[in-house]
Image (spheres, grey):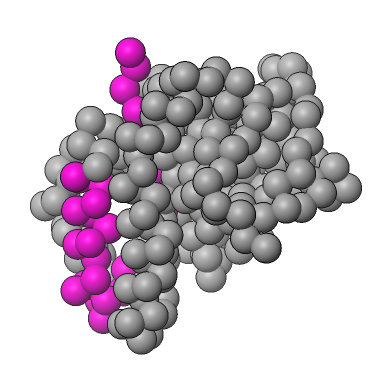
Amino acid sequence: MKKNAVVFSSWVPSQYFYRANIYLSFIRDYFSDCDVYIGVNSESDLVWVDIIESVLPEAQVALVDPSLSLNSDVPGFQSALKLLKDSKNEYENVYFMHSKGMSYPNDATWFISCRDYFMQFAEKRKEFDEIMEKDTSIGGIAHIARKFDMKTSKHLEQIVSYMDNTKTAIQVIPQDTMWLLTHYVIKGNIVKWFLDASKEEFFTTNLQDRYFFEVCFPLIVDAYGKRRENQVFWE
């Protein structure tokens, strides 16, 4: 079986270094068999890169171009996905996560957010792998989603616009769920399908949408013709 991969978007300014190890230790402990690609968002202290190298020495790390800067995890994902594309590696599953809650100044609020989203998602990694191995109709699974009529939204059109449709056949099956909080897993062949057909502007344009990787990017699963699942519905 192919390896799995982690794509992690991070933002760690110096005042929050004491929080940082919890993210890296969970990646190390629950995804030790995975290749790891990390985007470091603007305004992170570069000592964060040294911390990454000390905990995850095999991880590939990319600094976000300041021109892509956005108050969001988005540019970190763009930079990490560029690393993944350039690697030309193929994976069974690709796990998307980010340093959820890091921007909260209150430590209690940060920890609740990190625990309820990032940590719980990581702890379910084995379960996600088993589900996707058993049911090949599933292209991805999110920790949290909500009902939303994606057929009437422009999100699918938006993500497809970053693909060169002369390179791939797009099979659109819009679904009625919107993934939330950017903690999800997508089949590696679907991620590779998108990256192989992606236009360079996907990696070099400021996407100007802080929710792009929550709402829009997961629709590559729909465009590929597979089903998205989730574990928790928000009303």
Which residue appears farthest toward the bottom when viewing the image? 106
**Residue 98 at least partly seen:** yes
Q: Position of residue 201 (x, y in %)?
A: 64, 42
**Residue 207 at least partly seen:** no
Between 113 and 79, the residue placed more toward the observer is: 113
- Residue at left offset 19%, top offset 45%: 29
- Residue at left offset 62%, top offset 35%: 228
Relative side of 225 to 85, left or right: right
Relative side of 146 to 66, left or right: right
- Residue at left offset 20%, top offset 37%: 32
**Relative to 195, does residue 53 appear above or below in the rendering?**
below
* Residue 100: quadrant of the picture: bottom left
Whether residue 74 is in magenta: the answer is no
Q: Which residues are magenta?
A: 1-29
Q: Position of residue 113 (x, y in %)?
A: 41, 70
- Residue at left offset 44%, top offset 20%: 133
Q: Position of residue 54 (x, y in %)?
A: 11, 52
